[in-house]
Image (cartoon, rainbow, N blue to C red):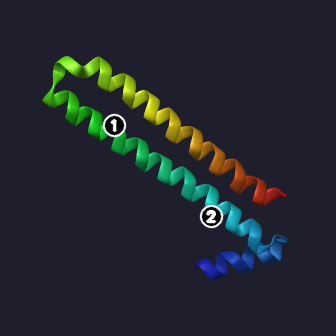
Amino acid sequence: MLSLLAMLLLEIGGSMSAFGGAIGAGLAALAAGIGIGQIGKGAVESVARQPEMSNDIQGKMIIMAALIEGAALFAIVVGLLTLFV
């Protein structure tokens, strides 16, 4: 299946670097979603154990999610630049 997509991309006029850029951008988005989900899971578990610390946990969770989102956005932009340049 992957080779069929690669051949189709080459016939359209792209190159293997464009194909790699598209795969890289997709994997970056997928990994960011998984990472933010894991942060949310850990925060919910922590609040369930210590409800009095919920404000601190929520603040740290938002900061970590923003850092992951920023790194993912950078990876997606690099992948898309590889795709179009």
> Earlier along the polypeptide chain: callout 2 or callout 1?
2
What element does badge 1 sit on?
helix
Disc 1 crowd rating (10 Å Cα; few below 14, some 14-19, many 20+) is some
Viewer-proximal residue among 6 and 69: 69
At 82% across and 70% down in the image, what residue appears?
14
Viewer-proximal residue among 52 and 33: 52
At 34% across and 24% down in the image, what residue appears?
58
Select label 2 or label 1 by which is in front: 1
Residue type for callout 2:
Ile
What element does badge 2 sit on?
helix
Q: Residue 48: name its quadrant.
A: top left
Image vertical order of residue 33 relative to residue 1, above or below: above
Q: Residue 79: name its quadrant.
A: bottom right
Image vertical order of residue 45 relative to residue 11, above or below: above
Name the spot of residue 67 as percent of width and height, x first: 52, 37
At 50% across and 41% down in the image, what residue appears?
68
Viewer-proximal residue among 6 and 56: 56
Viewer-proximal residue among 13 and 44: 44
Name the spot of residue 83 as percent of width and height, x first: 76, 60
In the image: residue 76, left or right of residue 63: right
In the image: residue 21, left or right of residue 84: left
Q: Which residue is mark 1?
A: 40
Name the spot of residue 22 as percent of width and height, x first: 67, 61
Q: Residue 74: name its quadrant.
A: top right
At 58% across and 44% down in the image, what residue appears?
71
Q: Which residue is mark 2?
A: 23
C-beta proximity under 8 Å, tags 2 and 1: no
